Amino acid sequence: MSGQRVSEEYLDGIREGRAWFKRYGMSDARENLDNLERTARTFAASSPVGQMLRGERDFWRLQLRKHKGKGKAV
């Protein structure tokens, strides 16, 4: 990621995911990710909403990968 920057909206999406994770843990993680993936496709990747959705989507992808690696059923 040399020289690339992420938008504030993308970071906001990550913050949204973290807030949900802090409150509810991994409950509904798969459903959240599925919904984010579907919804993100309806917005241009460069739009503010598209950036926010992609940030949250990427957060949940990483969480699912981390938890799957620990042998936890998700």
Image (cartoon, rainbow, N blue to C red):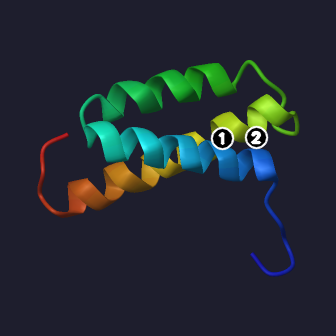
Q: Is residue 56 left or right of residue 6?
A: left
Residue 7: image location, x then y, percent? 82, 54
**Tag shown at residue 51:** 2
SS for dot 1 = helix
Relative to residue 2, is residue 20 depicted above or below?
above
Q: Residue at x 70, y 38 (%)?
A: 52
Residue 24: image location, x then y, percent? 28, 36
Q: Is residue 43 left or right of residue 53?
A: right
Q: Quadrant of the C terminus?
A: top left
Looking at this view, is 69 or 49 the one in front? Answer: 49
Q: CA distance from mark 1 to mark 2?
A: 5 Å
Q: Quadrant of residue 26?
A: top left
Q: Is residue 21 left or right of residue 12?
A: left
Residue corresponding to mark 1 = 54
Residue reaching furthest to the bottom: 2
Looking at this view, is 59 or 19 the one in front? Answer: 19
Q: Quadrant of the N terminus?
A: bottom right
* Residue count near mark 1 (Cα–Cα under 10 Å), binned few <14, some 14–19, many ≥20: many
Relative to residue 48, is residue 64 depicted above or below?
below
Relative to residue 32, is residue 46 depicted above or below?
below
Q: Residue at x 77, y 30 (%)?
A: 49
Amino acid tagged 1: Arg
SS for dot 2 = helix
* Residue count near mark 2 (Cα–Cα under 10 Å), binned few <14, some 14–19, many ≥20: many
Q: Residue at x 87, y 33 (%)?
A: 47
Residue 73: image location, x then y, percent? 13, 43
Amino acid tagged 2: Gln
Q: Is residue 37 left or right of residue 61?
A: right
Q: Residue at x 34, y 47 (%)?
A: 22
- Do the CB atoms of the residues marked 1 and 2 lie less than 8 Å apart? yes
